[in-house]
Amino acid sequence: MSEFSHTVKSPQSSQHSWVTWALAALVIVLLAVTFAIARTHSPDAEFGGADSNAVTALEEQGVKPWFQPIFEPGSAELESGLFAAQAAFGGAVLGWAVGRLQSRTAIRRLQENKHSALEDVAAGDGD
């Protein structure tokens, strides 16, 4: 019989599942509360980044930029799209890396289990 033919769900794994869902719900609630509070303080405000605020403050003081951008998107929508593509690419790379590390750990565990099973058979304990 194969190692993977049966699975036993431990109480610990169901506890981890509950904790994961609770943390995800907490993050969603915190985000909703944050946006609700921000909306009540300034309902007509646009989302502006810290970069644009910093640039405005520096230009008011007469500071000149050291470098010029190589590429400036034609519109805010294009800029947002490029930023989203960059985030998606970064997420894909991160997901690949985490999956690779997880599979490496799983393979290592399988090899250790196989090695210990072979030692048991060699010692005459297996049957």
Image: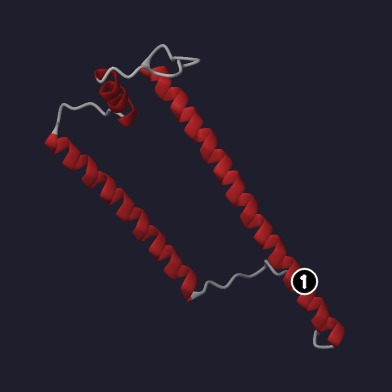
> Hey, which residue is sitting farthest top in the picture?
74
- Colour scheme of this structure image? secondary structure
**Mark 1: which amino acid?**
Lys
Image quarter of the C terminus = bottom right
**Residue receiving disc 1:** 114
Horizontal relation, residue 1 to residue 39: left or right = right
Q: Position of residue 25 (x, y in %)?
A: 32, 54
User: 103 or 54, which is in the foreground?
Assistant: 54
- In the picture, residue 126 is in which quadrant? bottom right
Which element is circle 1 on?
helix
Horizontal relation, residue 12 to residue 120: left or right = left
| On screen, residue 65 above or below 35 | above
| On screen, residue 71 above or below 4 | above
Horizontal relation, residue 1 to residue 12: left or right = right
Query: In this view of the protein, can residue 29 be seen by the observer?
Result: yes
Residue at 19% from the left image edge and 27% from the top image edge: 45
Residue at 60% from the left image edge and 70% from the top image edge: 7
Query: In this view of the protein, can residue 1 be seen by the observer?
Result: no
> Hey, which residue is sitting farthest bottom in the picture?
124
- In the picture, residue 68 is in which quadrant? top left
